[in-house]
């Protein structure tokens, strides 16, 4: 494990019992956990290679409690790590030894649904899928659908700007959130956005979404809900190789079609998935595309035909179109089970999340194959083909000495490759701790310092989720320094931090 | 007037450094189409006009990178040539201020968060700015976001930049998400609805399988005998026709629908989306929870406003003849009562000097926003007094 977390503050650790007592004064009863055995379930998130029991866990139930806990920790210089359902794949909710873990799981209420204005107001602990389940009886749904939607919370989705297989057409979390109530590290409660579009002023909501728990703790979320499409159909197309599948994807989009979902799997992933769920994936192809369209039946029928035509023109060797919901779900079953399926062919796997310009796909796959040979580790590829978001799954065995480190090094090389071809380190999983030390590959020191100054505007004492996202912790006073001419700060009347 | 026309990011850095040294403040200007927006001020103008042109456009990637000073019309023509579009439907503010169209730049419309009728379903400028290069108030060039459509690496500073009105930095390059232009778009309309009924019809359409991409309402007026409520259906022809068949059933209790010809439709969307033809010295835009729009319009009826609804009621354009601060206060109060906001778009300088263009934020939010601005611009070199009345003399 190559990512190092900041050294714990021994002075804070020495005060552990007193901190627990003070926090029990704010969140009574079982809302403060300090028993070592009871802390264990919180020691990691979805990035399970990293484990660290928190100093304490606090489970508040009201925004007033969240505010009081943060205010107290702010005053006492105690770090806080917020946590939703703990499904982050990048270590965003990894505890720190000297920090309070603030679990938001008790915020489980749906507060309001307005079908006229097409919004739902929910607490952050409500799961992604529960929002859809709440509104589907009226024919609505919440569009972003990360694979963990049965477990992941909307508060965590906001923190990570979660995506999903439908986000090419329907957007990420950020495009589907209208407002939040947020508690800052000093305990201040602010409301950003609301039920209306494009509020005046800086789009602070826009920077909160995807801020990975570093800027504030969300205590209420207003999301857009959409009418559920009348119908959906999927086509399963096999290609001799990923290049021809990639060419098909490019032509689909070039012809003006934005499918609801467009997923690609390589040979290794196809075989693993088929062995796991038996849904009839072709096994003699080099790449498989699942293309889903939704909307009125007439639109689906028309687009499926168009896509079949484009697939044929790009060398498709097999093609099956779903004729009913059962078949459509079967097409997806393999893709959605791809991760656990790969988990059956390898003791461990490490899921990457880079995005590339799609036109560079053949080159990236070729070089990834070479890296696979160089590192002596297998790789299976599933990706959101429409938006170029790759999820290479690196196969390794954590029980073999050195393999985890090799898998991490392999993964880092893949992400460097993504950036080199014009892409990014993470398309939807977040930076967290996982890609923290790679940030300089994508951003200059100036770029990173500018982002950190935003952090300072929200949390100048750097107490909220420190050690995540940024490879170097700069003190805010240091970042705030300006080159001053002749000892004069211009515009002395303006407040500064 | 003092004007600088940088030709490169380095020139722009120099301009910021000079301003810091000289205690000058910088107004970042695209084409100047919104120069009459906000409080009167006397800042040093930095024109982005010389930093124009396309850097990279790959239609199949849905990504366009362009210099900030590129005219909006050029960008729209470029993407239209590839059967694509800027889905947030930005428009040129020039005509609203009595100037000819054509001056608006891509940097300007994104920095002002300008979005048209499709905003309600396709998102705003914020949702389509993928990345940028900018010069901060420290005189440093920095980048944020990326040139791919899906990215969560680092803070989403493009969201902050879109709609920031040049207050956190001067964008030099923008990377935008572009989308396929619908192969077919038709407008169907119902006539004679009042504001309440229009909102109800729009809400029903937007919440239905008809999948309307925009919904707007223009009331009756001097040149229009009957109110008209518009629904735009866009997409592939078989889909448009199928959905066009759904709407009359869905809205049967509101009246008969008719399909408009493209000229009539374009003019009406221009009124609803961009306030074209809404005469009056003072022009407001109210951003509201859509269901609150009829109440807000009714509350302001005593002022005899000309108005229209877009975004299914989420946007109210409102033109008044009353140039007094008292009337402005009433508009702000009506928007606040509706849990929304009111932005003063057009007004005589005397009114703009005393009424802030943007809706006031809650004190804690205003303070947070100020700290965020200082994070980009510690010395306040971009604080030209356009939005803060107290500082308009500074």
Image (tube, coloured by chain):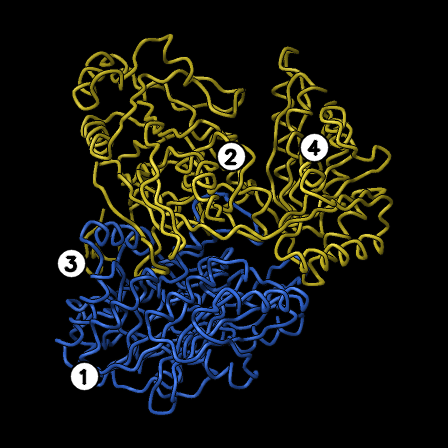
Q: Which is nearer the eye, A288 or A133?
A: A133
Residue at (29% x, 31% y) in the render: A463
Residue at (58% x, 69% y) in the render: B244
Distance from disc 4 to disc 2, alpha carbons, whole Å, reads 17 Å
On-image quarter of the N terminus of chain A: top right
Q: Residue furthest front?
A: B253
Residue contact at pointers 3 and 4, CB within 8 angstroms: no
The tint of chain A in the picture is: yellow
Which residue corresponds to mark 2? A149
Colour blue maps to chain: B
Which residue corresponds to mark 4? A334
Tag nearer the camera, 3 or 1? 1
Where in the figure is residue B114, as x and y percent of width and height? 41, 69
Distance from disc 1 to disc 4, alpha carbons, whole Å, reads 64 Å
Tag nearer the camera, 3 or 2? 2
Mark 3, secondary structure of its residue? loop
Same chain assignment for discs 3 and 2:
yes
Same chain assignment for discs 4 and 2:
yes
Taking A388 as reference, is A95 above or below it? above
Mark 4, secondary structure of its residue? helix
Mark 1, secondary structure of its residue? loop
Same chain assignment for discs 1 and 4:
no
Which residue corresponds to mark 1? B322
Where in the figure is residue A129, as x and y percent of width and height? 48, 36
- Count of numbered labels shown in the rendering: 4
Distance from disc 2 to disc 1, alpha carbons, whole Å, reads 52 Å
Residue at (56% x, 59% y) in the render: B177
């Amino acid at each position: 494990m190559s990512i190092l977390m900041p050294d714990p503050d021994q002075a804070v650790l020495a005060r552990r019992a007193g901190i627990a007592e003070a926090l029990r004064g704010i969140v009574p009863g079982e809302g403060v956990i300090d028993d070592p055995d009871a802390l264990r379930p919180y020691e990691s998130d979805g990035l399970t290679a990293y484990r660290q029991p928190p100093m304490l866990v606090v489970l508040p139930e009201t925004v007033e409690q969240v505010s009081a806990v943060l205010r107290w920790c702010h005053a006492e210089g105690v770090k806080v790590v917020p946590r939703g359902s703990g499904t982050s794949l990048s270590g965003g909710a990894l505890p720190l030894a000297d920090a309070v873990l603030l679990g938001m799981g008790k915020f489980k209420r749906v507060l309001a649904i307005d079908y006229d204005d097409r919004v739902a107001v929910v607490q952050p602990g409500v799961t992604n899928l529960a929002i859809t389940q709440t509104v589907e009886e009226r024919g609505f749904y919440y569009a972003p659908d990360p694979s963990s939607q049965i477990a992941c919370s909307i508060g965590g989705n906001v923190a990570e700007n979660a995506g999903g297989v439908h986000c090419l057409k329907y957007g990420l979390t950020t495009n589907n959130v209208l407002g939040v109530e947020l508690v800052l590290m000093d305990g201040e409660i602010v409301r950003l956005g609301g039920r209306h579009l494009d509020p005046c002023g800086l789009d602070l909501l826009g920077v909160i979404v995807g801020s990975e728990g570093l800027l504030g703790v969300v205590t209420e979320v207003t999301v857009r809900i959409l009418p559920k499409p009348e119908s959906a159909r999927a086509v399963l197309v096999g290609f001799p190789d990923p290049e021809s599948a990639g060419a098909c994807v490019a032509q689909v989009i070039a012809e003006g079609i934005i499918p609801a979902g467009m997923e690609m799997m390589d040979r290794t992933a196809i075989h693993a998935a088929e062995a796991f769920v038996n849904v009839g994936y072709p096994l003699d192809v080099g790449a498989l595309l699942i293309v889903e369209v939704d909307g009125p039946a007439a639109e689906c029928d028309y687009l499926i035909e168009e896509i079949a035509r484009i697939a044929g023109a790009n060398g498709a060797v097999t093609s099956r179109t779903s004729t009913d919901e059962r078949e459509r779900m079967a097409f997806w079953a393999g893709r959605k089970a791809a991760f656990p399926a790969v988990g059956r062919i390898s003791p461990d796997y490490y899921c990457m999340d880079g995005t590339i310009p799609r036109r560079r796909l053949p080159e990236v796959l070729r070089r990834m194959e070479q890296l696979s040979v160089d590192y002596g580790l297998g790789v299976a590829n599933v990706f959101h083909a429409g938006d170029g978001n790759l999820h290479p799954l690196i196969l390794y065995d954590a029980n073999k000495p050195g393999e985890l480190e090799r898998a991490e090094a392999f993964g880092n090389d893949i992400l460097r490759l993504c950036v080199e071809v014009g892409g990014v380190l993470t398309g939807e999983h977040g930076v967290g701790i996982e890609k923290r030390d790679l940030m300089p590959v994508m951003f200059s020191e100036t770029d990173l310092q500018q982002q950190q100054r935003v952090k300072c505007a929200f949390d100048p004492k750097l107490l909220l989720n420190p050690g995540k996202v940024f490879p170097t912790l700069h003190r805010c006073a240091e970042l705030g320094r300006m080159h001053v001419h002749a000892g004069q700060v211009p515009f002395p009347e303006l407040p500064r931090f | 007037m003092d004007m600088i026309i940088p030709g490169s990011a380095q020139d722009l850095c120099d301009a910021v450094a000079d301003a810091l040294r000289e205690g000058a403040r910088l107004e970042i200007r695209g084409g100047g189409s919104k120069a009459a927006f906000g409080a009167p001020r006397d800042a040093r103008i930095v024109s982005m006009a010389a930093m124009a042109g396309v850097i990279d456009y790959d239609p199949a990637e849905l990504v366009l990178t362009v210099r900030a000073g590129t005219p909006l019309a050029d960008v729209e023509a470029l993407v239209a040539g590839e059967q694509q579009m800027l889905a947030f439907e930005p428009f040129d503010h020039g005509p609203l201020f009595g100037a000819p169209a054509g001056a608006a730049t891509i940097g300007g419309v994104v920095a002002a968060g300008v979005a048209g009728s499709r905003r309600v379903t396709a998102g705003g400028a914020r949702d389509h700015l993928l990345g940028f290069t900018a010069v901060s108030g420290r005189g440093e060039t920095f980048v944020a976001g990326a040139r791919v459509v899906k990215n969560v690496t680092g803070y989403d500073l493009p969201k902050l930049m879109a709609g920031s009105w040049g207050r956190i930095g001067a964008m030099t390059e923008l990377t935008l998400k572009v989308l396929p232009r619908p192969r077919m778009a038709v407008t169907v309309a119902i006539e004679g609805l009042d504001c309440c009924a229009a909102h109800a019809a729009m809400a029903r359409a937007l919440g239905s399988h008809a999948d309307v991409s925009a919904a707007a309402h223009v009331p009756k007026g001097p040149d229009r005998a009957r109110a008209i409520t518009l629904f735009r259906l866009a997409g592939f022809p078989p889909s448009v026709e199928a959905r066009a068949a759904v709407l009359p059933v869905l809205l049967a209790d509101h009246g008969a629908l008719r399909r408009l010809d493209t000229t009539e439709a374009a003019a009406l969307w221009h009124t609803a989306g961009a306030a074209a033809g809404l005469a009056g010295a003072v022009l407001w835009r109210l951003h509201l929870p859509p269901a609150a729009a009829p109440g807000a319009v009714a509350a302001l009826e005593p002022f005899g406003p000309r108005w229209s609804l877009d975004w299914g009621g989420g946007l109210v354009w409102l033109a008044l003849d009353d140039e007094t601060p008292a009337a402005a206060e009433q508009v702000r109060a009506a928007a606040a009562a509706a849990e929304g906001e009111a932005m003063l778009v057009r007004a005589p300088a005397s009114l703009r000097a005393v009424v802030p263009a943007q809706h006031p934020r809650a004190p804690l939010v205003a303070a947070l926003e100020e700290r965020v601005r200082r994070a980009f611009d510690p010395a306040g070199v971009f604080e030209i007094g356009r939005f803060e009345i107290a500082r308009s003399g500074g």
